Amino acid sequence: MIKCKVTLAGVVNKAATTHAGKDNKPFVSFGVTLPLGDKNGNVREFEVGVSADPSLITAGLVSIGKRVQVVGTLYFRKRDDVIYMNMYADSVTIDVSEVDRLEGEMEFKGRTGNKEIYLLSDKRKKQFQAFSAYSKEASVENATFIWVHFLNFSPDKAAWLKPATSISVRGTLDLKLYNNNLDLGCQVKEISEWKFEDKKSEEVTQQ
């Protein structure tokens, strides 16, 4: 499970339209462009698909080119090795002057990979842990896994951490571009062991 409470600011690239959900309850959807860069200065534009209750916005006011700010919950979905971003809005503000950004907190439940937990030092010789963990999507017939790269600057509080361990993490979301793909990262604020309820053993390839 990966769930993020975020604030998104960007330009609308798909105008808002009204739809009926599975329960025939109406909702408004639109797309927002999110540019992300890598350490080499390369930039790629991604789309965040936003859904909102009609009481929050009038669909006709959210047109292509409008700059908006959306506060809500962000989820990730993976299909054919592509990660998509879907957001459910708590509030939508139109015609803002905010620069393009997506900031917030991640809540993660999953399992560390089979590689070791690296204990590294920054330029100030402060130690931190670097590791990757994956979350399984249970909503699809064929299991898919989304990897997140974590940095933990309080390694003394997670000395128990080891490969193939189920964990629960809260921290700061960090999205960036890597090899022209969306890369999910998180700076750890809280980490604890988590009881993995799926008893089936799962072998996945470490990223």
Image (cartoon, rainbow, N blue to C red):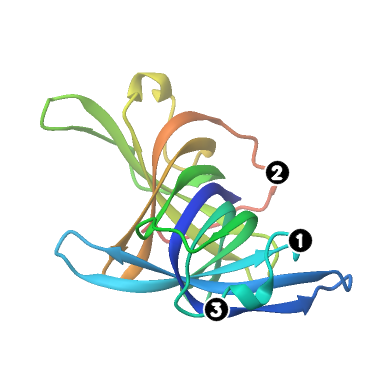
Q: Position of residue 137 (x, y in %)?
A: 62, 61
* Quarter occupied by residue 59: bottom right
- Locate residue 30, reporting x and y percent: 59, 74
Occupied quadrant, residue 28: bottom right
Mark 3, Cα crowd under 10 Å, few <14 / some 14-19 / many 20+, is some
Q: Tell me what residue is drawn at x 89 percent, y 70 percent.
A: 23
Does 87 sit above or below residue 181?
A: above
Marks 1/3: CA distance? 17 Å
Task: Give the structural element (helix, strand or loop) at label 3.
Answer: loop
Q: Earlier in the sequence, mark 2 or mark 1?
A: 1
Q: Residue at x 35, y 58 (%)?
A: 99
Nearer the N terminus, badge 3 or badge 2? 3
Q: Viewer-nearest of labels 2 and 1?
A: 1
- Location of mark 3 (residue): 63
Type of the residue with mark 1: Ser
Amino acid on which disc 2 is placed: Glu
Nearer mark to the viewer, of 3 and 2: 3
Instruction: Read off the residue under disc 2.
Output: 197
* Residue 55 disc label: 1
